């Protein structure tokens, strides 16, 4: 007898085709047979050691989070209900050009400091790896859900060039190409960049093109957080399209939004740009989260010249009155490159988390509100936070536009990504709610997508981008990474007021044929492993 049969499920198989009723049989971590209702009539139905009555439930492939920041959370928190309870069975890590491999001892410490706001400093983690392969091996000891990894271009640049704003020498470029090739050989699926974050933002296009040539030659893809989501956003998107076409490298645009007042209603211009490129033969996909606010660190808003040299140099500049005055002018008057070329509006910057618990009273307030309570200018409050919290403060940026969100999620190249930061007292609810919000709010309530369309966006499309031959569809022989959800009730529990509440309407989630969510509760199973690049 097989391990499990899921009876009378409404199968939405990830292809975009209409749903159908079927019994789905699972054994040894794979789907071994699918018996459609018509075929089952008059014949003996499949039997298994365990049976689940899925009457009224949709069975779909597990959801793939194309933009996750769980690089340390997967190691720190075996439960990982934030993602497992959403039906996520695979996350793509190493995002925005900064993560923890490849590194040496110096770079590891610098990166830990630089992205404390994303992942915590990691006091509770044994960093017993330095290479990409070593990190993937660490994941293979057992995690809640599967994980793929992008080589972070900023980390590579920090390792070879440092945190200075200068062009790489030919020898340094050769070394970076070598590190990218090694990471891909060890199993990474591509390369990411954070081109509004240091030190990745210091790379010129020629440097990025050369690294992308390597990525394309291995069958990987480039995933940039490009140079602006505000002023000059369309030009920044066009830059990435041209760069990857020159390098013959597939492109996946990270959290592809059009934000700030300058871009209200301009999503159709972005989509027209992408359609022209696709029609000309470009290989492009993108991901979005179904919310309007963004999320990053407070330090990320600083101008790039103020961030040169790494965290200690940033703190030194902030404590110098004259230099701090220059920073303030760039933020409030000029529009810093860290804030996407748009002068900062402090009333839109909500403090979502602090590294120092003594600063907890700031959380949940905008910088403007916190400054008003203290009777001081917003910059004085922001500067105090940056210094006292040693750059560990996270923020929400309330700068998005609902019409842009809806237009982009309808696009043929669209996939889902949470961009979820799991640290902080009040993290963005997208970390806990992205996938049920797609299914509940945008499918059931608004009808922006049909259920079949939406499931395809969240499953087979990302699996195709990752070149996974046996995931992303409900097919015989495919891995049993599966979700059972109730289309009538599925919804995020997470809100901006209570961002860590788990979703409703997702009673079962399987990873490699093992239940990680059963009867709506997290089991103790850790079936997840690294998902490594499929060789060409």
Image (cartoon, grey):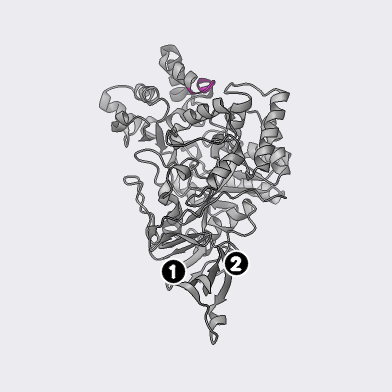
- Give the spatial CA distance, label 2 vs label 1: 18 Å
User: Residue 328 at what x, y percent from top left?
Assistant: 43, 20
Residue at the spot 43% in from the left edge and 48% down from the top edge: 78
Most extreme residue toward the bottom is: 42
Q: Which residue is mark 2?
A: 475
**Number of numbered callouts drawn:** 2
How many other residues sit within 10 Å of disc 1, few (<14), some (14-19) or many (≥20)? many
Between 512 and 340, the residue placed more toward the observer is 512
Of labels 2 and 1, earlier in sequence is 1
- Residue 232 vs residue 43, the one in the foreground: 43
Residue range corresponding to the magenta coloring: 305-311
Q: Is residue 511 magenta?
A: no
Above/below status of 196 relative to 434: above
Q: Is residue 114 above or below residue 513?
A: above
Nearer to the camera, 381 or 507: 507
User: Residue 472 location, x and y as percent?
Assistant: 58, 59
Query: Which residue is found at the position 39% from the left and 62% from the top?
Result: 505
Is residue 460 in view from this perspective? yes
Q: Residue at x 62, y 48 (%)?
A: 532
Secondary structure of residue under mark 1: loop
Judge depth for marks 2 and 1 and give the one in front. 2
In the image, is residue 452 above or below residue 169? Answer: below
Give the side of residue 167 with respect to residue 490, left or right. right
x 35%, y 40%: residue: 426
- Residue for badge 1: 57
């Amino acid at each position: 007898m097989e391990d499990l049969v899921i009876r009378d499920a409404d199968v939405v198989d990830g292809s975009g085709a209409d749903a159908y009723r079927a019994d789905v049989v699972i054994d040894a971590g794979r789907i071994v047979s699918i018996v459609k209702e018509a075929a089952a009539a008059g014949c003996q139905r499949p039997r298994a050691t365990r049976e689940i009555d899925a009457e009224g439930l949709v069975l779909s492939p597990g959801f793939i989070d194309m933009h996750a920041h769980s690089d340390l959370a997967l190691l720190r928190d075996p439960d990982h209900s934030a993602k497992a309870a959403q039906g996520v069975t695979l996350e793509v890590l190493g995002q925005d050009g900064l993560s923890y491999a490849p590194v040496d001892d110096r770079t590891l410490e610098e990166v830990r400091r630089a992205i404390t706001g994303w992942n915590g400093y990691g006091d509770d983690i044994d960093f017993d790896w330095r290479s990409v392969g070593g990190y993937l091996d660490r994941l293979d000891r057992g995690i809640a859900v599967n994980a793929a990894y992008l080589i972070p271009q900023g980390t590579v640049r920090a390792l070879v060039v440092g945190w200075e704003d200068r062009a790489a020498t030919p020898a340094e470029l050769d070394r970076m190409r070598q590190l990218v090739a090694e990471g891909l050989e060890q199993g990474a699926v591509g390369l990411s960049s954070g081109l509004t974050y240091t030190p990745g933002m210091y790379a010129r296009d020629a440097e990025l093109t050369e690294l992308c040539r390597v990525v394309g030659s291995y069958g990987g893809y480039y995933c940039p957080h490009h140079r602006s989501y505000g002023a000059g956003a369309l030009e920044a998107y066009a830059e990435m399209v041209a760069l990857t076409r020159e390098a013959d490298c597939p492109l996946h645009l990270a959290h592809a939004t059009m934000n700030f007042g300058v871009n209200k209603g301009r999503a159709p211009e972005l989509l027209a740009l992408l359609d022209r490129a696709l029609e000309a033969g470009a290989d492009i996909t993108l991901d979005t989260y179904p919310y309007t606010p963004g999320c990053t660190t407070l330090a990320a808003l600083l101008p790039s010249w103020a961030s040169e040299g790494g965290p200690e140099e940033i703190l030194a500049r902030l404590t110098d009155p004259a230099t701090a005055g220059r920073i303030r002018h760039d933020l409030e008057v000029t529009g810093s490159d860290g804030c996407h070329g748009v002068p900062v509006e402090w009333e839109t910057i909500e403090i979502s988390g602090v590294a120092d618990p003594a600063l907890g009273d700031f959380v949940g307030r905008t910088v403007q509100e916190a400054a008003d309570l203290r009777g001081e200018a917003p910059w004085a409050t922001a500067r105090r936070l940056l210094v006292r919290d040693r750059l560990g403060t996270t923020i929400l940026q309330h700068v998005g536009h609902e019409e842009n969100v809806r237009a982009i999620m309808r696009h043929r190249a669209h996939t889902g990504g949470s961009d979820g930061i799991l640290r902080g007292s009040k993290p963005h609810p997208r970390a806990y709610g992205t996938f049920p919000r797609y299914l509940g709010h945008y499918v059931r309530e608004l009808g922006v997508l049909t259920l079949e369309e939406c499931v395809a966006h969240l499953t087979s499309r990302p699996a195709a981008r990752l070149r996974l031959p046996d995931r992303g569809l409900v097919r015989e022989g495919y891995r049993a990474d599966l979700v059972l959800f109730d289309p009538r009730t599925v919804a995020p529990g997470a809100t901006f007021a209570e961002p860590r509440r788990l979703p409703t309407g997702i009673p079962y989630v399987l990873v490699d044929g093992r239940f990680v969510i059963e009867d709506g509760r997290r089991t103790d199973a850790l079936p997840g492993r690294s998902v490594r690049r499929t060789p060409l």
